[in-house]
Image (cartoon, helix red, strand yellow):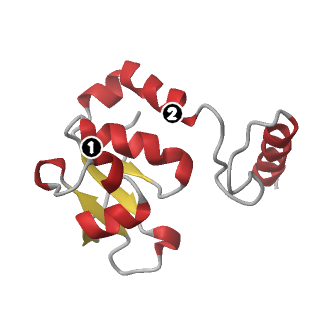
Amino acid sequence: MEKQRVREAIWRLLQEQKVSRFPGACGRIPNFVGAEAAAARLLELDAWRLAKAIKANPDLPQRPVRRLALEQGKRLYMAVPRLRSMKPFIELDPAHLESSPFEASSIGGAARAGRRSSRHFRSSGH
């Protein structure tokens, strides 16, 4: 219940501050004004610099994160929308992309440029 209460407060705040973007804030991982700047801040983190692979969700506010990962040569594992598959990730290897990182970072672009994967992940502790 606490997690849902926090979500609802954030959704309300994003709407009140008029910083939510399409498709709106409520009921999802919200897209927001500043998603690109937030992604760029990852470049300052040691964990980002050391990472060889990144796991991300397919939601629109994380597209800048996915694009940065591919541009920096990091292998990207993007969750399949709604995780409805025995292979719940799309693996994108930047060394073998036939499209731009921008194109491959979209849901449709990732589906075309990547391959389905059932890879299991462990936390790095960061």
Q: Which mark is residue 47?
A: none
Q: How many marks?
A: 2
Would residue 85 be visible to someone looking at this image? Answer: yes
Going 37% across and 58% down the picture, which residue do you hit? 78
Please tell me how crowded label 1 is: few (under 14), some (14-19), or many (20+) other residues with Cα within 10 Å.
many
Quarter of image, res 72: top left
- Observer-nearest residue: 53 or 70? 70
x and y, in percent, of residue 15 in the image: 83, 42
As drawn, the residue found furthest toward the left would be 95
Going 51% across and 33% down the picture, which residue do you hit? 36
Q: Are marks 2 and 1 in contact (CB under 8 Å)?
A: no
Amino acid type, callout 2? Glu
For disc 1, the marked residue is 70
Amino acid type, callout 1? Leu
Q: Which mark is residue 36?
A: 2
x and y, in percent, of residue 12 in the image: 86, 44
Please tell me how crowded label 2 is: few (under 14), some (14-19), or many (20+) other residues with Cα within 10 Å.
some
Is 19 left, or right, of 79 in this rendering? right
x and y, in percent, of residue 2 in the image: 81, 49
Quadrant assignment for the N terminus:
bottom right
Is 112 left, or right, of 19 in this rendering? left
